[in-house]
């Protein structure tokens, strides 16, 4: 490469605006059909577990604590998820959706890759492996 050609390219680069985006500081609006993290609506969920059964990556776990009182907990593992939205299409009651707002999944530790949905006490019971009737019997 000739030295004159190189200086010509360098000097023209100083006069042009950069093509790259300043990503963390300037963000574009995400597309409406972007498949981000999962959103769960506890009001419409019946705890059938069809979403966890149909998930090809085993990224969902449904814990049924008390079906009569509609007490359910859901564990979602975004690190396993392939964002195929099979769980969303399998849910007959419309309890699941893919958010297009939350899609950045980088983290320094693995603990942030487990998201628990539900009431805090229900989640604690589900993680302990107890149902509501077992927890009431053990407290008496």
Image (cartoon, grey):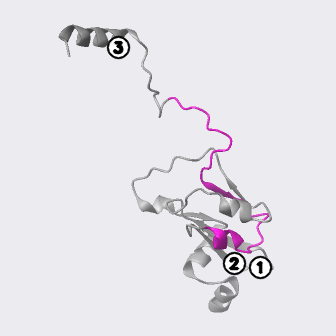
Residue 12 is situated, as x and y percent measured from the top left of the image, at 34, 9
> On screen, 108 above or below 73?
above
Which segment did they paint magenta?
A: 26-55
Whichever of callouts 3 and 1 sits on the residue coming sooner in the sequence is 3
The answer to which image quadrant residue 126 occupies is bottom right
Q: Which residue is mark 3?
A: 13
- Element carrying mark 2: strand
The image quadrant where one finds the N terminus is: top left
Left or right: residue 114 versus residue 101 is: left
Nearest to the eye among marks 3 and 2: give it. Answer: 3
> On screen, 68 above or below 81?
below
Residue 123 is situated, as x and y percent measured from the top left of the image, at 61, 71
Disc ID at residue 67? 1
- How many labels were placed on the picture? 3
Mark 2 vs 1: CB contact within 8 A: yes
Q: Which residue is rendered at x = 67% and y = 91% of the image?
A: 137
Left or right: residue 8 versus residue 67 is: left
Disc ID at residue 64? 2
Disc ID at residue 34? none
């Amino acid at each position: 490469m000739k030295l004159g050609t190189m200086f010509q390219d360098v000097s023209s680069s100083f006069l042009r605006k950069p093509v790259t985006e300043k990503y963390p500081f300037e963000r574009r609006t995400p597309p409406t059909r972007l498949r981000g993290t999962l959103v769960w609506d506890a009001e419409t969920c019946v705890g059938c577990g069809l979403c966890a059964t149909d998930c090809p990556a085993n990224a969902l776990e449904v814990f049924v604590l008390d079906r009569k009182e509609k007490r359910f907990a859901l564990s979602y593992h975004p690190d396993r998820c392939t964002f195929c939205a099979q769980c969303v299409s399998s849910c007959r009651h419309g309890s699941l959706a893919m958010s297009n707002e939350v899609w950045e999944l980088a983290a320094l530790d693995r603990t942030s890759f487990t998201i628990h949905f539900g009431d805090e006490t229900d989640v604690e019971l589900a993680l302990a492996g107890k149902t509501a009737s077992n927890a009431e019997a053990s407290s008496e």
